[in-house]
Image (cartoon, coloured by chain):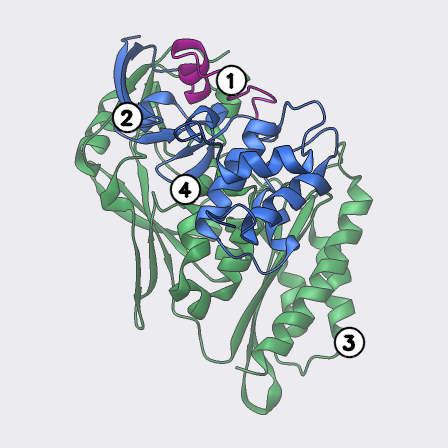
Chain colours: A blue, B green
Amino acid sequence: MEKQLLRFYVNDQEYELFINPKTLLVEALRDHLGFAGTKRGCDTASCGVCTVIVNGMAVKGCSVLAVQVNGMNITTVEGLEKEGKLDPVQAAFLDEGAFQCGFCTSGMIMSARAFLNETPAPKDTMEIRRGIEGNLCRCTGYNSIVRAIDAVAKGKYREGA
Amino acid sequence: MIHDFTYLRPGNVKEALAMLAQHRDGAKIICGGQSLLIIMRQGLVVTEYLVDIKGLDELNYLIYDPRAGLKIGATTTHRTIEKSLLIKEKYPVLVAMEEKLASIQVRNWGTIGGNLAHADAAGDPAPVLIALNATVTIASSAGGRSVPLEEFYPGLFETVLSPDELVTEVLVPPPPAHTATAYQKFNLLESDQGIVAVAVSLSVGDAGICRDARIVLGNAAPIPIRAKNAERLLIGNKLNEEIFTKAGETAGGEADPVADIHASEDYRRHLIAVLTKRMTKEAWEQACQV
């Protein structure tokens, strides 16, 4: 085994790691860089709690080798807040109480963010549900999660709204 | 835990093929890794070298030519196929299949070449692509060849690939006239693999006769299989409810399913019969309109 140099951007900051190539993206983020907002759950690409945004796309950090994102831009839940202001999705999750145990929350928020970036005006809540199909909430608190995403889509958190 | 390996990142296909030729059985190819990393973590796959082709943009393309058909480069992601307006127009069944393949996150990173080479009998793309009569383009440093996808799988989790070979492209022929393809899997969770899956492609000929039929069963045997006896019931006939039902029952009998925690063998045969009937009917109704 030969260690590999990984140079990438996490939440707009450049990082360099010298790692075992078997290191998963979720491990690089949590264990090497301390971005513990990204959770580790099923480890089989089922639950979605490790979801981060890579070059604009939601991916599961447990199923991507860290060396594969060399040169890419990663956004974790820690990167959503801008200048002390929560991302609208975060604010909506708070307002709608879209949490129970909270373990799925950061992955859910990252999937919701990526979904809304791609689909700013979903045509109905079914489309929102499909947008978070890769994330499980074992507390089954889906209704409040969908309400939160719907509120953002309907412009409730737009500047000046 | 994943066993240690030496990571190799070729800069182009030629380099990748040279690495495979050099390390042969000692090397595994990773692309999106959405299936491979799971089984590596389970210790089912241990490799000395891992050749990472995910970054090979020369294999990331969709090209449609009315005469040659659709060429999909091996590193093209599922999501690219799902979002392609071109594919939606020419092969809508591929978009419908992709929309139900695993989850958005998996489709964003996983690739068509990786999926086919992983050779999981429950994979979604293979049955549909076999129904569409697709071929797989294979390269090695010694040359290249083309294999019908139908002949690509000799057994469970096996392909005809030699250790020095790489899937570079999937070629889907142009849709024949008056032909439609329908696909459905049966699953309890939206983002699961199918407990069984059925893809049916039908062509309507003169006087409303079924000219050609391809029925492909997924997760109904160790590999995707054609239900050829069911196909024979359709070809040369005007189709109706009675024939759809009979074709379904016949396909259920042709399957060689396993019993596992998801379903018994009998239940799988039943599901295959129901889905084959429905998909045959759906493909027929669509084919009569195009």
Which badge, 4 or 1, is on the more N-terminal residue? 1
Residue A27, x across and y down, in percent: 45, 15
Could you say which disc has been placed on residue A104 in the image?
none
Callout 4 secondary element: loop
Q: Which residue is mark 1?
A: B41
Residue A93 quadrant: top right
Question: In the image, which residues are magenta?
Answer: A24-44
Residue shown at the point (68%, 47%) measured from the top left: B196
Q: Are marks 4 and 1 on the same chain?
A: yes
Q: Are marks 4 and 2 on the same chain?
A: no
Q: Classify mark 3: residues with Cα within 10 Å, few (<14), some (14-19) or many (20+).
A: few
Q: Chain of mark 4?
A: B
Callout 3 secondary element: helix
Q: Which residue is mark 2?
A: A70
Q: Are marks 2 and 3 on the same chain?
A: no
Q: Nearer the viewer, mark 1 or mark 2?
A: 2
Vertical relation: A64 (above or below) B280: above
Q: Is residue B154 visible?
A: no
Q: Which residue is mark 4?
A: B111
Q: Are marks 3 and 1 on the same chain?
A: yes
**Foreground residue, A14 or B85?**
A14
Q: Chain of mark 2?
A: A
Kind of residue indicated by mark 1: Arg
Q: Nearer the viewer, mark 3 or mark 4?
A: 4
Callout 1 secondary element: helix
Q: Nearer the viewer, mark 2 or mark 3?
A: 2
Quote the CA–CA distance across marks 2 and 3. 56 Å
Q: Are marks 3 and 4 on the same chain?
A: yes
Q: Classify mark 1: residues with Cα within 10 Å, few (<14), some (14-19) or many (20+).
A: some
